Image: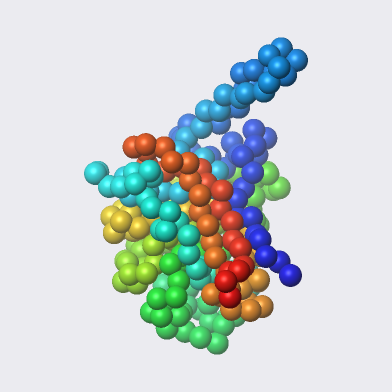
Amino acid sequence: MTTLIDLTHLISLSTTPLIIYPGDPLLSVTPHATIPKDGYTVHTIQLGTHTGTHIDSPSHFVHGGRTIDEVPLDQLIGRPLVVDFASSPTKLIERQKIEWEDLESAWGSTSSSNLDDELVTGNYSIFLVNTAWSKLHSPKLQGDVPKFFAHPYFSSSVAQRLLSYPKIQIFGSDTPNPDQTPYDGIGGDSGYPFHEILLGGDRLIVENLANLDQLAAAARTGDQADWIVNVVPLKIEGVDGSPVRAFAHRNWST
């Protein structure tokens, strides 16, 4: 029985540069000391706060908003509800705007319960969406970077709806951005309304999650509440986000 699921992409010089948000700092990993020369190994790492699987704190878009070091641990751990488009008859297309009704439909295709009814219970603090786009159009597998960045995105009304559920503290998905990503002059004209609304409501966003299909499948075999998701950022003073090690484990107390 699966008890641990890694939700984090490997940070790698061969693959990570393909999924870095256009214009963000590039990744660099270089030896600083080596065992043959120094008797020990140390590396110098340079990367942006939004590299790989990462979390956005409110200060990413809100002047004076909380920085990542100000986010308490209890907001980074919780029960997830996973909406899985990979198991839904509804398949998303390039740059499709995902509305709340689309999420309800995808949820309803694998569950007998109503999405709103689940969320108002207050049993969940993390709302995750597997669009399946990042696996279907992974640049490291398909070599199509423009296609990867032409991912579906979320309506600002979805962010507004999530704020109506006080227990939901984190929104996360497999895509690199819940808003449209501009690439080669295409997309991004509407700005970043999802970020502005959700982070403006003092919530958190996790992007580039991996293996959400595995978590969704595992949750369907039992109870969604059997699982706990952990999102562990670096505790860096005064910054707007951090790469994370995200993982899910079966709730050992149940």
Residue placed most toward the observer, 27 or 203 = 203
Q: Residue at position x 34%, y 46% from top?
A: 70
User: What residue is drawn where x is 41% and y is 37%?
Assistant: 236
Point out residue 208 in the picture as x, y percentages from the top left corner: 54, 51
Name the one closer to the observer, 252 or 21. Answer: 252
The image position of residue 136, as x and y in percent, is 65, 57
In percent of width and height, residue 252 lies at: 60, 69
When the figure is inspected, residue 121 is found, relative to residue 27, above or below; the finding is below
Q: Position of residue 139 (x, y in %)?
A: 64, 45
Outermost bottom residue: 112
Pick the residue in front: 185 or 11. 11
Locate the C terminus and report the quarter of the image it occupies: bottom right
Judged left or right of residue 200, residue 19 is right
The residue at the far top in this view is 37
Answer with left or right where residue 88 lies relative to residue 54.
right
Q: In which quadrant of the rendered image does the N terminus lie?
A: bottom right
Q: Tell me, what colour scheme is on the image? A: rainbow
Is 154 drawn above or below residue 254 in the view shown?
above
Q: Residue furthest left?
A: 64
168 relative position to 25: left or right: left
